[in-house]
Amino acid sequence: MPKYVLVGASAAGIGAVEAIREIDKKGTITIISDEQCPQYSRPMISDLISGKADFGKMMCREHEFWEKNDVQALTGRTAVSLNLSEKYVMLDKGDLVDFEKLLVATGGRPFVPKIEGSDKEGVFTFTTLSDAESLALKLEKAESAVVIGAGLIGVSCTEALVKRGLEVTMVELQEKILSLILDPTASEMVENVIRKAGVTIVTGQTVKRIVGKPENDKAVGGAVLTSGDQVDCDVVIIAIGVIPRIELVTGTKVKTNRGILVDKTMRTNVKDVYASGDVAEAYDFVYGENRLLPLWPLAQLEGKVAGYNMAGKKADYPGGTVMSSLKYFGIPVISIGVANPKDPDPYEILVNHDPERSLYKKIVLKDNQIVGVTLVNCIEKAGVLFHLMKNSVNVKKFKQDLVSDDFCLATLPRSLRRKLYPGEYK
Amino acid sequence: MKRIIVKEEHCIGCGLCEVYCTVQHSKSKDIIKAYNKEKPRPTSRVTLEVHKPVSFAIQCRHCEDAPCVTACLSGAMKKDEETGLVTHDPDRCIGCWTCIMVCPYGAIKMDSSGKVVSKCDLCAELDIPACVANCPNDALVYKEVKK
Ligand SMILES: Cc1cc2nc3c(=O)[nH]c(=O)nc-3n(C[C@H](O)[C@H](O)[C@H](O)COP(=O)(O)OP(=O)(O)OC[C@H]3O[C@@H](n4cnc5c(N)ncnc54)[C@H](O)[C@@H]3O)c2cc1C
Ligand code: SF4
Ligand code: SF4
């Protein structure tokens, strides 16, 4: 009976458990997580802060998920080292867990830059449930906050704080917010909405020092920006990004770059050792190379592919790409692939921008294939575009229609629809 | 397993499928009340897609290997092992639109409340889904398909 051991029980770990159990009902599965309650949805920690979700609603699987799938869940336990030749994982108390197939799904940890004063009480990161719980406690007495970083996590945290009634200043080093996923036009549309909600946005700057309160230097009292200006606040949240937690495989034969390197089956260079999720560098079909893509849907899919292969069913990861959907501050945005090509040369860009209705559609083409999609306030057909993108469809004949207001499945030529959606539309 | 089959050459673009889907998913189940009284107006889960002269209705295909289920951030989208249906639980949904991004058919809509998504449930409580039953031209057919 195969012994599966999974380290990390979040998106990738859950995806792997479901896939393994689809194929193998008997093999023993042990999952190790240093968190107490693993099966929660990380993206939902902002809903816990805003009060939109309670603990129960945050579970992305039922409470009995592990029992139902006959998984031994070692929660609150850390895997500290690996022995690949003797095939075991060592845990924090020195106990050993043998494996036949191992999945490293250890995700990422928040990147925390060195900032003077970051040891003060009231400085938080925003990645885990326990981060959110301690922040929520602190917020009972806080009135204002500085959020460092205006990427996806920073924006989600900011929205939650605004809903809690805090006065928030968002500080971003780049000239635009969400600059990794949005072009300047889309970024500005989102920025306007966030400002309207009362948030102060400071771009092109960072926090160089965190200072204490006049009456208590140990507690956060303000953040000093690069310009020298000080923003008074009760809490500082560092939301700059995550870095892969590769420490478990560091020093072993498992090859890493910034993340763990994997092939299309999610296997590392070592037999029987797999990696998935934020910790892995998986295939990006737009860039044609493996890279870090810390996103929930991809982590689940990668975990699923690893799970199938671990259980003996051949499966290839189809590849993912940067793909973000944003709901924050009531402005729906979807951005997939190349949002903002620096060198416009090999690309063709199609745009439909209607400021009056606050609509924006942009498609980036390369050799008549879609490589980038940005949609603001008109997201419902995003999946059709993504499907064309994944299937490298030549869109030359109907490219102008891609950005039209009424683009939909019916826009596609019939022959193409039949090819792309076999079995439908007889 | 019964599924809705779309016959585009029979579709005349009348939009009755949307009307009856809206009514079926309204509180009152009454056409006038559903359209004129309920606020926000209930969302039709089927969409009449038009690109003249082509038109057809599209609703969730209940995919075998459903991308929306794998992508869902909250666990609101689920595959029912027994019926094979892809179900959506609006109480768990956080309206993150991730499923919209990955549905190859564009079959998921933002609910008219703007807070969650909405998609075809094959009218679980009816023998024949409302859109199929009310299509005047048999452009939608409900029939057994192989798994
Ligand atoms: C606030 C926030 C909002 C987000 N919003 C979105 C969004 O809208 N859309 C989106 O696609 N993505 C979003 N993400 C990203 C998404 O949450 C991640 O991509 C996803 O959680 C990755 O899953 P994972 O399983 O790879 O790793 P993780 O979720 O990082 O989980 C890894 C688990 O392994 C545990 N672990 C690590 N090392 C060890 C060890 N040695 N021993 C034991 N346990 C260990 C960790 O504690 C953790 O529980 C968001 C993230 C955050 C924080
Ligand atoms: S919503 Fe879309 S992806 Fe999900 S099952 Fe239905 S058709 Fe498939
Ligand atoms: S919008 Fe709702 S159903 Fe869709 S992915 Fe988000 S939580 Fe899941």
Image: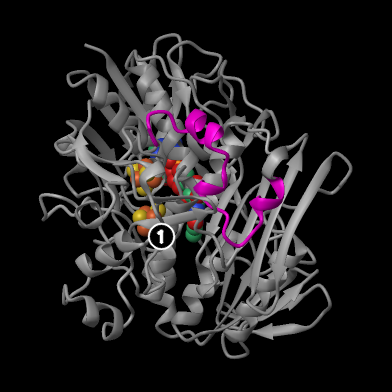
Instruction: Residue A202: name its quadrant.
Output: bottom right
Please state the horizontal and vertical placement of residue A390, each as a whole percent of the image. Answer: 58, 34
Q: Where on the image, by quarter, is ligand 2? A: top left
Is residue A416 shown above or below B15? above
- In this picture, residue A146 sits left or right of residue A132: right
Q: How many marks?
A: 1
Residue at figure coordinates x 26%, y 13% from the top left: A2
Q: Which residues are magenta?
A: A399-426
Q: Tell me the quadrant of the picture where the N terminus of chain A can be found.
A: top left
- Foreground of the two, B77 or A22: B77
Is A100 rendered above or below residue A231?
above
Between residue A224 and residue B62, name the one nearer to us: B62
The x, y position of residue A26, in whole percent, is 17, 19
Reading the image, the residue beneath label 1 is B109
Which residue is depicted at the point 31% across and 45% down?
A76
Q: Is residue A121 visible in this depiction of the protein?
A: no
Q: SS class of the residue under badge 1?
A: strand
Asked whether A110 or B114 is in front, the reply is: B114
* Number of residues whose C-alpha sits closer than 10 Å to that of mark 1, classed few (under 14), some (14–19) or many (20 or more): many
- The residue under label 1 is which amino acid type? Lys
Where does the C terminus of chain A fall, quadrant-wise? top left
